[in-house]
Amino acid sequence: MNMLFGGGSYYYLVLILEAFCIIHCLRRGTQQQWLWILIVIPVLGCLIYIYKEILTNRHSIRIPKVDVGAVLNPGVKLKRLEDELRFTDTFANKVKLADAYLEAGFTDKAVEIYQASLTGAFAENEHVLAQLIIAYYEQERYQEIVPIAQKIYKLPQFARSKAHMKYAEALENTGQVDLAEKEFKAMKGRYSYFEQRYQYGLFLVRQNRDEDAYQVFADILNEERQLSAMERKANKVWFAKTKDELKKLAVA
């Protein structure tokens, strides 16, 4: 390749183009069809790939599959998952049903399945442990959350998760306010993690630190203006809640 283009910047341009196409095909799941071509004939392969997979499909819209019955009647989804577990009693089917129970508000049923799932090779399953933290919080079993959180605390996916939020709130509810604030601060980040930061603001209000809470809420709304329309839409619930809290603090 270096000989073909005489070295210099052309070589790096080809590498960049090749890397772009390879990453794109890996994300689309078409690596079996394209990866070998992109590696063996990088320039021609990349040009063909861009034409067929990017330019030709630029107007195509992928419509996600929606279970209309489950949306209109959540009981339909639960019944289907219950039947699946009845016919195929696997760990995956148990967890899917428990997750659906938790989402639908049947926390006791969800906890029962989660607890029964933590056996054998799945005794320390991180997803189930994280879901248990959320479910235990709903049941106000704050003391039991702390040891579970410590098992998965160092996992990267726990860092700014909903389970981490509930762990911080559980610490607060067990009187460990300083530790709780430390966890809330660990979940902060500019132009992101708005739910976590909103919950931190509420924590500060509960600690009668209205000025600090006001600053947290104000920062969230200031960043909203810099976001794309899609990002604002994805977080509109937290922006609306933040505005309400700012109004309350302004009145106070």
Image (cartoon, rainbow, N blue to C red):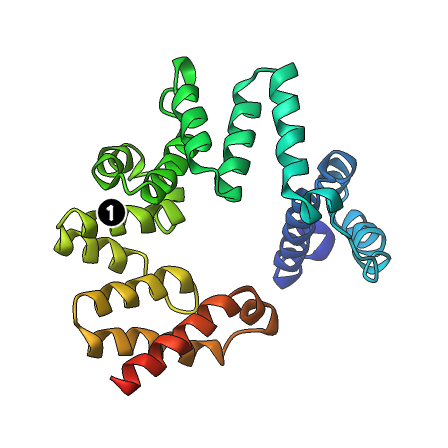
Q: Nearer the viewer, residue 105 or 208?
A: 105
> Percent position (x, y) of residue 90?
56, 17
Q: Give the x, y percent position of residue 209.
A: 17, 73
Q: Identify the residue at horizontal 65%, vertical 53% (top origin).
A: 20
Look at the image and tell me whether residue 86 can be seen.
Answer: yes
Asked if residue 183 lies left or right of residue 86, the reply is left
Q: Most extreme residue toward the top, as rendered?
A: 120
- Percent x, y for residue 64? 74, 49
Q: Is residue 95 left or right of residue 216?
A: right
Q: Is residue 72 above or below residue 147?
A: below
Picture residue at 28% right of the left edge, 43% below the top: 140
Is 167 placed above or below 181 here?
A: above
Q: Position of residue 230 (x, y in %)?
A: 60, 68
Q: How many marks?
A: 1
Secondary structure of residue under mark 1: helix
Which residue is at 47% across, 73% downward? 240
- Quarter of the image for residue 248 reads bottom left
Judging by the rendered image, the residue that carries numbered circle 1 is: 170
Amino acid residing under circle 1:
Ala
* As drawn, 238 above or below 103: below
Quarter of the image with the C terminus in it: bottom left
Tell me the residue at 37%/20% (across/down). 123
Viewer-nearest residue: 218 or 42 = 218
Asked whether the viewer can see residue 193, the reply is no
Left or right of 245, for residue 169: left
